[in-house]
Amino acid sequence: MSAVTVFVPKDAAAVSVGADDVAVALSQEAQNRGIDINLIRNGSRGLLWLEPLVEIETPSGRVAFGPVSTSDISGLFDAGFLSGGDHDLGQGLTEDIPYLAKQERLTFARCGVIDPLDLTAYESHGGLVGLKKALELEPSAIVEDVTASGLRGRGGAGFPAGRKWETVRKESGDQKYICCNADEGDSGTFADRMLMEGDPFTLLEGMVIAGRAVGADTGYIYIRSEYPHAIRALNDAVSSFERANLLGKNILGSGQAFIIHIRIGAGAYICGEESSMLESLEGKRGQVRAKPPIPAISGLFGKPTVVNNVLTLATVPYVLANGGKTYSAYGQGKSRGTQPFQLAGDIARGGLVEKAFGVTLRELVEGFGGGTRSGRPVRTAQVGGPLGAYIPETAFDVDMDYESLAGSGAMLGHGGVVVFNESVDMARQARFAMEFCEIESCGKCTPCRIGSVRGKETLDKIIVGEDLEKNLAVLEDLCVLMTDGSLCAMGGLTPMPVTSALKHFPEDFGLARQAAE
């Protein structure tokens, strides 16, 4: 009898709830029973409420069991789970789980499916097709395909990737760079980490394609120190690419040269901003640069530089392999393709959902997320990170795309969705936004550095009911000043959660009490 293949994730989220212990216990139990298994440590499927999610390869497909603890192992073997036997933890065929079946997995097609560091498995599941096509194309043709796809930056700004690449491609000079910003710092976001841990080769492939497209031979991945699992995965992935001649001076005999360096940041939120990241990469303090010039013209070490987020670069292999028009068939309006949404906070089924732009916030929170984990009514969700707007439950029918959210006074950001129940105090959430900016500001510009401090102090007065009318007027002025006068989005967007909380939940700021008085 041939060995049964068993998958246990080594994703950090799964490991945090005991996946390593489950893997050891599975191997030990199989050995004790004289059963031969082939244990593969894969990435996470993103169904985080079911982690550790154990999958069994069967003739009918992969069968899922979860969440599995070490105390469940003996019972699973007794139930014949290796042949798909019934058990209370059984979820049926993995691909048929509604949470997963209703997604459009393009960027995350392989995540959770294969051993992240098995290059043979990567290629057998569609990897390297995009790179091999790109090596046969002229750089301008690669840029044209990326432009036709409608792919936009997934780091938050949403700038068209093709337009940025074209700017760098047209710049003269013998040195250009590709910089991947993996400094994923938004609260409630984990898509970058999941991708780097679960399918790192696709990020490397995207960076090599980008280098080919714009004439760059060097790439940097700037990753936060809080992601040790991802750092190890990327280092191992780079070594595998080098051994396979997918990085180096003459990639696959094409004459194309490209190398990748991994640099670890110290976790400063401001380094998620592209110019601050570049300063840090150069060995300087992470501070925002004044623009112009933009990085595409004068970026790393003053050279033309493409700065893209992990998800943007990791999507490029799909675009090249399947064509820009295929990718642009997903989505709506100017928001083309798919977005990996991350569901967190008080939510029953937290995890990653990759959907075409246009899915509503209500579909994400109620359909995929299943409402709150606590069972209490949903009051609001913050979309787009700690500087994103609070959207009330009554407005959850908004389409999740760049333009629709902007039209409602919100933003997509990195696709994070943090859910809050009825117990949340929105005045204190507004205060948190100002305090967060105070702590994370690089300090270069006065509106951000001082405005956030004054905003926190003013909100402290509002929370205790001190001179409400006067202090609310001061807060409004501060928000206008920070929005209009800050050097970057750190200070410029901090007012968004504050003003949205004021607009939708005035009673938490004492306004209802003031009106009654």
Image (cartoon, helix red, strand yellow):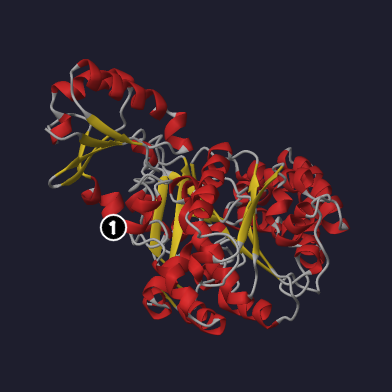
Viewer can see residue 464: yes
Q: Where is residue 447 in the image (x, y as percent from the top left)?
A: 84, 58
Asked which quadrant contains residue 133, the reply is bottom left
| Coordinates of residue 250 in the picture (x, y in percent) | 56, 66
Please name whichever residue, 239 or 291, is drawn nearer the observer in this view of the structure.
239
Residue 189 visible? The answer is: no
Above or below for 476 versus 23: below
In the picture, measured across the screen, residue 94 lies left or right of residue 159, that is left
Label 1 is placed on what type of residue? Lys
From the viewer's perspective, tell me whether residue 351 is left or right of residue 151: left
At horizontal 73% and vertical 70% (from top left) the residue drawn is 175
Which residue is nearer to you in this view: 155 or 138?
Answer: 138
Question: Residue beneath label 1, please?
Answer: 102
| Residue positioned 41% across, 67% down in the render | 318
Residue 9, quarter of the rendered image: top left
Badge 1 marks a residue whose secondary structure is: loop
Left or right: where 365 falls relative to 472: left
Residue 76 lies, in percent from the top left, at 20, 25
